[in-house]
Amino acid sequence: MVKLRLKRCGRKQRAVYQIVAIDVRSRREGKDLCKMGFYDPINSQTYLNIPSILYFLEKGAQPTGTLFDILKSAGVFYEFRKKVN
């Protein structure tokens, strides 16, 4: 099963997260299937590759809780609903 999750990058006390599709059995910094953007919680910056995210959501990938909130605020699920119907 594939999950959409945050992968920690950056330095100590200055975390930046990559948004990746990754196998459930992999650890947090494990090998990812596809990089789909990044999230910087300190500067409140987000970059999303929406077509790639929609592709994995259509295939059944499940986002984690924090990533679900990020995608929801960006309106990705509205696009997903519009594309499915």
Image (spheres, helix red, strand yellow):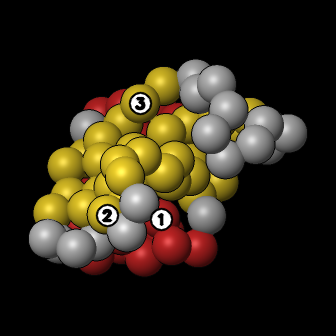
Q: Which mark is residue 35?
A: 3
Residue 33 in the image: state x and y as whole percent: 58, 23
In which quarter of the view is residue 74 placed?
A: bottom left
Residue found farthest to the right: 25
Q: Which mark is residue 22?
A: none
Q: Residue at x 56, y 36 (%)?
A: 21
Mark 3 → mark 1, Cα distance in angstroms: 14 Å
SS category of the residue bearing label 1? helix
Mark 1 surroundings within 10 Å by alpha-carbon count, few (fewer than 14), some (14 through 19), many (20 or more): some
SS category of the residue bearing label 2? strand
In which quarter of the view is residue 40 placed?
A: bottom left
Disc 2 or 3, which lies upstream in sequence? 2
Q: Nearer the viewer, residue 52 or 80?
A: 52
Q: Nearer the viewer, residue 58 or 22?
A: 22
Please say if the residues under marks 3 and 1 sit with CB atoms less than 8 Å apart.
no
Mark 2 surroundings within 10 Å by alpha-carbon count, few (fewer than 14), some (14 through 19), many (20 or more): few
Please say if the residues under marks 1 and 2 sit with CB atoms less than 8 Å apart.
no
- Relative vertical location of residue 55 with respect to residue 54 in this rendering, above or below: above
Residue 63 in the image: state x and y as whole percent: 58, 58
Mark yes or no: residue 58 visible: no
Q: Amino acid at mark 1?
A: Leu
User: Which residue carries the number 1 mark?
Assistant: 67
Mark 1 → mark 2, Cα distance in angstroms: 19 Å
- Relative vertical location of residue 44 with respect to residue 1 in this rendering, above or below: below
User: Which residue carries the number 2 mark?
Assistant: 14
| Quadrant of the frame with the N terminus | top right
Left or right of 42 in this view: 7: right
Disc 3 or 1, which lies upstream in sequence? 3
